[in-house]
Image: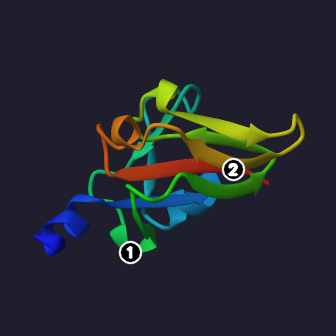
Amino acid sequence: LEGKTVQLHKAYYAFGTSKELITQGVLTKEGGFIGIGKAQKLKDNFNKNYFTEIDASETTTIPLSCKKAKIITNHPSASYKMEGTKEKVEKLLINNADQFWSASKYLVVVVEQ
C-alpha cells in the first residue's frame, strides 16, 4: 500500500531557457507562419530523464531565480503563483497541490535569465 501511495504522489518538473529545453528534447515549437507565432509545447516523446522527480504531496515550492518564468504545461492558474519582485521571479509557489497536478504530473517552466 505504501508503494502505491509513493507512486501516486510522484510528479516531475523541468525548467530552463527555451533553447535549452528544445535541445534537451523536452519542448518543441509548432504552428505559426514563416516563423512567426510558433507556440511552445511539450514534445510528444519528450526526454523524461531531464526532469527532477518530486513528491507532489510534499513539494509546495520550486526555486526558479530568473527574470521571467512561463509555465508551458497545463496547470490551473488558481493553484499556483510566481513569487518575487518585478525584476526577478524567485520561486513557483503551489498553493493547491491536488488541483495543480490534476491535469499533468509533468511541469515545464521556460525561464529567461
Question: Along the horizontal axis of the image, is 1 left or right of 101?
Answer: left
Above or below: residue 11 compared with residue 107: below
The residues bearing labels 2 and 1 have C-alpha atoms spaced at a distance of: 23 Å
Left or right for 65, reference 16? right
Mark 2 vs 1, N-terminal side: 1
Q: Residues within 10 Å of mark 1 (few under 14, many from 20)?
A: few
Nearer to me, 71 or 54:
54
Occupied quadrant, residue 16: bottom right
Label 2: few (<14), some or many (≥20) within 10 Å? some
Please tell me which residue lies in front, 60 or 19.
60
Q: Nearer the viewer, mark 2 or mark 1?
A: 2
Q: Which residue is outermost to the front?
A: 1
Q: Give the residue type that dot 1 points to.
A: Asn
Q: Quadrant of the C terminus?
A: bottom right
Q: Nearer the viewer, residue 79 or 26?
A: 79
Please tell me which residue lies in front, 96 or 31: 96
* Residue 32 seen in the figure: no
Residue shown at 29% from the left, 59% from the top: 9
Image coordinates of residue 90 in percent, x first then y, are 76, 50
Q: Quadrant of residue 101?
A: top left
- Report the residue marked by disc 1: 49
Question: Helix, strand or loop at disc 1?
Answer: helix
Colouring mode (rainbow / by chain / secondary structure / one colour):
rainbow
Task: Identify residue for label 2.
Answer: 91
Disc 2 residue type? Lys
Residue occupying the point 78% across, 52% down: 66
Tell me what residue is drawn at x 44 percent, y 50 percent.
Answer: 107
- Local secondary structure at mark 2: strand
Image x and y of residue 33, in percent: 50, 24
